[in-house]
Amino acid sequence: MPQRVVFTPDALDEEFGQQILARVSAQNLEVELLKSNRLTGLRDPGGDVRATYRTAKNTLAVVKAPAGALRLQPTPPSADWQLNLAEGCPAHCQYCYLAGSLSGPPVVKAFANLPQLLANTASYERPGRVTSFEASCYTDVLGIEHLTGSLAEAVRHFSQREGAQLRFVSKYDHIDSLLALPHRGRTRARFSLNAEPVARRLEGGTASVEARLQAMRRLALPVAQGGAGYPVGVVLAPIMPIPDWQQHYTELLDRLQQAFDFDCDLTVEFITHRFTPGSKDVLLQWYPNTSLDLAEEGRAVKRNKFGGLKYVYQPEQMKAMKAWFYAEWQRRFPAAPVHYWT
Ligand code: SF4
């Protein structure tokens, strides 16, 4: 629950913004109606980055997404297009993927013009194939679903789109509001999982790995067996070669296998840990005492076409981890495709 909820005037002009207002008011959250569409007062007046971080993470701002949000960006290898229902996330992962990629204090912004954003996706569908839309590029949509209802709205929308698929990924477990939705198999619900030492040490404010496993199980179980019959997925990320990594990841895969003792539409995505100079800088300001390994030494440098660089594991180590994860996955889940390794 955020400590502060603010609405911009433009957000209140939107019907969906009014729905969010009713939802947060019903949860007895104090609501502030801003006089302008600019979000102010989020930075600590004394310039304390940690204080700014805390205030922002505890603030939900309901805003109208700018016109630029209607120009969708591709998001390989996860999906064809980004579909951002919100930006920012209330959790405290010390390796957070958002660090350095969103500007300003890490406030959670939910978009009030959601129906417009959803309708806009139709022009991005490609004929003759299923076009996928990723809702989790800049937020954890399930983490704020109790406040916004945006994910349920998106699931309903895509249930009506023959040629499209919605994808989201989460580290939360409150999935009750999704269970009875008419998703028609067009939303893939993925859960981010990791070895216990990584999840416990680095993923503050999220649901436990066990809770995520059980949430995924309930979404995936066939309707005839009391579940919701969603296509589901595991996002194993960020994979880290911590001491005894094979043992810790074996335990995770074994638990997953126990939870998935039935047939369902399951996929996996493997993402190894990486960081950029910019994300390292932001993360060390947010989490100055982190035990996350952010040493450049021993990493390989990967450059993108714009000259930006990121630090990834050495090719030999990557090769060994990839071979191990593929073999262990395929042995346990031969019918569940690996979507990608990165
Ligand atoms: Fe960042 Fe994802 Fe963790 Fe949220 S759940 S803090 S977006 S890594």
Image: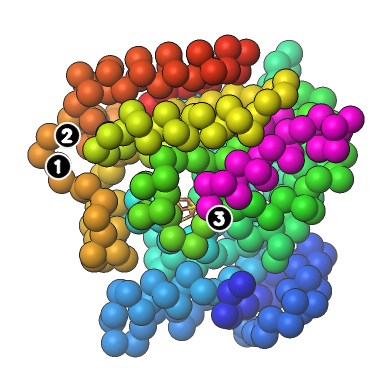
Q: Are marks 1 and 3 in contact (CB under 8 Å)?
A: no
State the mark number for residue 296.
Answer: 1
- Residue, x 27% and y 18% (percent of image)? 320
The amino acid pointed to by label 3 is Ala
Side (left or right) of 180 relative to 39: right
Q: Which residue is mark 2?
A: 299
Range of magenta residues: 208-234
Q: Quadrant of residue 238?
A: top left
- The residue drawn where x is 57% and y is 64% is 109
Q: How far separated are the C-alphas under marks 2 and 1?
A: 6 Å
- The residue closer to the viewer here, 172 or 25, is 172
Q: Residues within 10 Å of mark 1 (few under 14, many from 20)?
A: some
Q: Label 1 amino acid?
A: Glu
Residue 43 versus residue 324 in the image, above or below: below
Between 156 and 226, the one lying in front of the other is 226
| Element assignment for label 2 | strand
Q: Kindly check if marks 2 and 1 are in contact, taking CB atoms under 8 A apart as contact.
A: yes
* Residue 226 in magenta stretch: yes
Q: Residue furthest left?
A: 297
Q: Residue at x 34, y 87 (%)?
A: 45
Q: Residue at x 15, y 45 (%)?
A: 295
Mark 1 or mark 3: which comes first in sequence?
3
Tell me where residue 326 appears, x and y as whole percent: 43, 16
- Quadrant containing the C terminus in the rendered view: top left
